[in-house]
Amino acid sequence: MNSSQLEPVLRESAPALLGYFVRRVEIAEDAADLVNETMIAAWKSMKRAPDDPIRARMWLFGIARNILAHHARAGRRRDALVDRLSVAIGMARSQDGESDLDVRAAVASLPSELAEIIRLVHWDGFSLEEVAILIGRPASTVRGRHAKAREMLRERLTPAAPVLATQLSIDYPQ
């Protein structure tokens, strides 16, 4: 089949394809995208399309069925990923104690670049040299700003909570 033969089949089948997808997907807005994917797939493989318009319509719905199956598989993979992320986030939150919330608040109160240096070094495990590369600053500047950030955190964290300081590997005066 050539493009001049395929165009009328696509045009005439579009409303029926939309109905096909609307009845089979949970999110109605996905149906239009799936029709579009079907049309693109049909256009790319038009050489395999039958010349008979009735058979061409059936061929088009076969493509639509495959597109729908792919959409369903992708949805299941997405849902599984969301479930795994939810579990991981829940575990991370359950490990956070009140003291961790205090540390987070203290870090958040720092100027943004200092807070990012602290997060990258103490939470994400980067060395100061690696942080320098990540944020595009000289290593000496990052070392100085890291020291300044640690001092500011030391001041913000109360003397009654030396545990908080140790969570950031801060030398806390006893």
Image (spheres, rainbow, N blue to C red):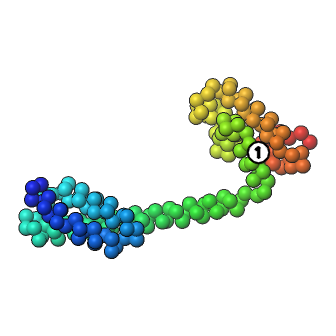
Q: Residue furthest bottom?
A: 23
Query: Local crowd at mark 1 within 10 Å, few (<14), some, or many (≥20)?
Result: some
Q: Is residue 156 left or right of residue 140?
A: right
Q: Residue drawn 82% across and 42% down? A: 156
Observer-nearest of 34 and 136: 34
Q: Is residue 159 left or right of residue 22?
A: right
Which quarter of the image is occupied by the C terminus? top right
> Is 13 located above or below residue 112 in the figure?
below
Measured as percent of width and height from the top left, residue 136 is found at: 58, 29
In the rendered image, which residue does mark 1 sit on?
A: 106
Q: Is residue 169 left or right of residue 131?
A: right
Which quarter of the image is occupied by the N terminus? bottom left
Q: Is residue 148 left or right of residue 81?
A: right
Location of residue 137 by image quarter: top right
Q: Residue drawn 13% across and 67% down? A: 56
Measured as percent of width and height from the top left, residue 39 is found at: 23, 59
Q: Residue drawn 24% across and 56% down? A: 40
Observer-nearest of 16 and 71: 16
Measured as percent of width and height from the top left, residue 3 is found at: 12, 54
Q: How many marks?
A: 1
Location of residue 42 by image quarter: bottom left
Kindly identify the amino acid type of the residue bearing the numbered disc 1. Answer: Ala
